[in-house]
Image (tube, rainbow, N blue to C red):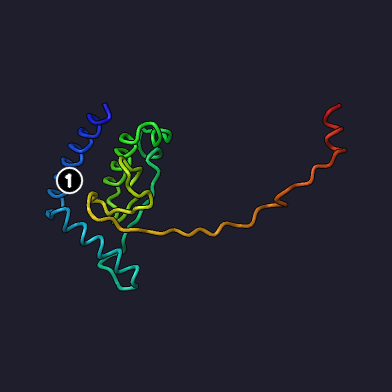
Amino acid sequence: MADKNLEKYQQEQKKIKDEIERKHGKTVEQLYKEREKRAKDVTELRVPDRVPLSINADPANYTEIHRSAAYYDPIGWKRAVREVTVAFEPDMANAGLPVRSAPSAVIRPLVAGMRPLMMLISVDLPEPFGPIRPKISPCSSVRLMR
C-alpha cells in the first residue's frame, strides 16, 4: 500500500513539474537556479533581482489535512505542503516531512527534487516567568484538603 501511495505521489510530482514548466516557460532546473541565486544574493548582501519570498506555512491552516497527518500519513502531509508551496510560489519553502531519510532542516525552492539549500535557525528564548522550582507552602496545601 505504501509503495502504491509513493508511486502515485511521484506521478503527481511529475504532472506538477510539467505544469510549472509550462506556466513559466522555463525548465525546473532554470527556475531552481534563479531562486537559488536570489537567495544567495540576499545572504551575501548583494541586491537580488527581486526580494525573495520564504514561507514556513502550516498546511493544516490552508488545506483540509489535520496536523496529526504529519505522523500517520506522511505522503498526505507532503501533498498538503506541496499544495501550499505551489499556491504561494515562494523562492524557498519548508520541504515538509521526509518520505525516506531526507534531512528535516532542508529549505527547498518551489521546484523540488533538486539540490536543496540549507538554512540553520537560531532562536533566543526569553527568560522564564517566575522561579524554575516554585515553592509550595504546606499551609496552602492543608487548606485545600479540608
Looking at this rendering, what residue extends furthest in the front direction? 101
**Secondary structure under badge 1?**
helix
Q: Is residue 74 left or right of residue 8?
A: right
Residue 91 placement (x, y as % from top left): 28, 56
Give amino acid for label 1: Lys
The residue at the point 68 percent across, 52 percent down is 129
Between 52 and 72, which is closer to the camera in this rendering? Answer: 72
The residue at the point 83 percent across, 28 percent down is 145
The residue at the point 83 percent across, 31 percent down is 144
How many residues crowd around disc 1 within 10 Å: few (fewer than 14), some, or many (20 or more)? some
The residue at the point 30 percent across, 41 percent down is 100
The image quarter containing residue 44 is: bottom left
Between 25 and 117, which is closer to the camera in this rendering? Answer: 117
Residue for badge 1: 17
Residue 112 placement (x, y as % from top left): 24, 49
Q: Quadrant of the N terminus?
A: top left
Q: Quadrant of the C terminus?
A: top right
Q: Is residue 122 above or below residue 78?
A: below
Between 2 and 75, which is closer to the camera in this rendering? Answer: 2
In this rendering, the count of numbered labels is 1
Q: Is residue 92 left or right of residue 58?
A: left
Residue 17 placement (x, y as % from top left): 17, 46
The image quarter containing residue 117 is: bottom left
Q: Is residue 51 above or below residue 4?
A: below
Residue 111 placement (x, y as % from top left): 22, 51
Q: Is residue 117 left or right of residue 122?
A: left
Looking at this rendering, what residue extends furthest in the bottom direction? 46
Q: Is residue 17 above or below residue 5?
A: below
